[in-house]
């Protein structure tokens, strides 16, 4: 085991940075508390499209999504916005 010695001031700055980061994460997590998330299969069924079509929507930026590992998730509000845009374009 290796021991690393740093100055107290540097250590306190590191702790402050970690606390700021933790506060930002907490704020982000709390800001989306009421948002419903849908998985790829649910959105495909809702829109009545294939997984490949959903991939095309994601690739083109037509629909916002978040990815955790290999799974894609969509905010219900983003899906509603996508549907409204599709209705306007048709």
Image (cartoon, rainbow, N blue to C red):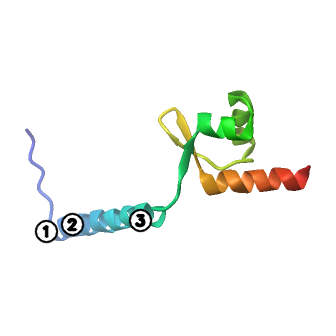
Front residue of 10/74: it is 74
Q: Is residue 64 left or right of residue 67?
A: right
Label 3, on which residue? 30
How crowded is the residue under tag 2: few (<14 C-alpha within 10 Å), some, or many (20+)? few
Q: Secondary structure at mark 3?
A: helix
Mark nearer the N terminus (3 vs 2): 2
Does residue 79 sit above or below 1 in this rendering?
below
User: Marks 2 and 3: in contact by CB < 8 Å?
Assistant: no
Callout in the foreground (3, 2)? 3
Q: Residue at the location (30% across, 66% down)?
A: 17
Label 1, on which residue? 8
User: Marks 1 and 2: in contact by CB < 8 Å?
Assistant: yes
Q: Residue at the location (70% across, 54% down)?
A: 80
Callout in the foreground (3, 1)? 3
Residue 33 occupies quadrant:
bottom left
Q: Is residue 39 left or right of residue 2?
A: right
Residue lying furthest right: 90
Q: Residue at the location (47% across, 35% down)?
A: 69
The tag on residue 66 is none
Q: Position of residue 27 (x, y in %)?
A: 40, 67
Rounded to the nearest angstrom, the CA distance separating label 2 from label 1 is: 5 Å
Image quadrant in which the N terminus is located? top left
The tag on residue 10 is 2
Q: Position of residue 6 (x, y in %)?
A: 15, 60
Front residue of 18/2: it is 18
Rounded to the nearest angstrom, the CA distance separating label 3 from label 1 is: 33 Å
Q: Position of residue 61 (x, y in %)?
A: 72, 47
Q: Is residue 37 left or right of residue 62?
A: left
Mark nearer the N terminus (3 vs 1): 1
Front residue of 68/41: it is 41
How crowded is the residue under tag 3: few (<14 C-alpha within 10 Å), some, or many (20+)? few
């Amino acid at each position: 085991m290796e021991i690393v010695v740093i100055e107290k001031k540097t250590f306190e700055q590191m702790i402050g940075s970690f606390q700021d980061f933790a506060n930002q994460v907490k704020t982000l997590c709390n800001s989306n508390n009421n948002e419903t998330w849908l998985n790829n299969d649910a959105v495909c069924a809702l829109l009545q499209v294939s997984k490949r079509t959903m991939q095309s929507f994601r690739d083109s930026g037509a629909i916002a999504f978040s990815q955790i590992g290999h799974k894609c998730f969509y905010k219900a509000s983003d899906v509603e916005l996508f549907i409204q845009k599709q209705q306007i374009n048709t």
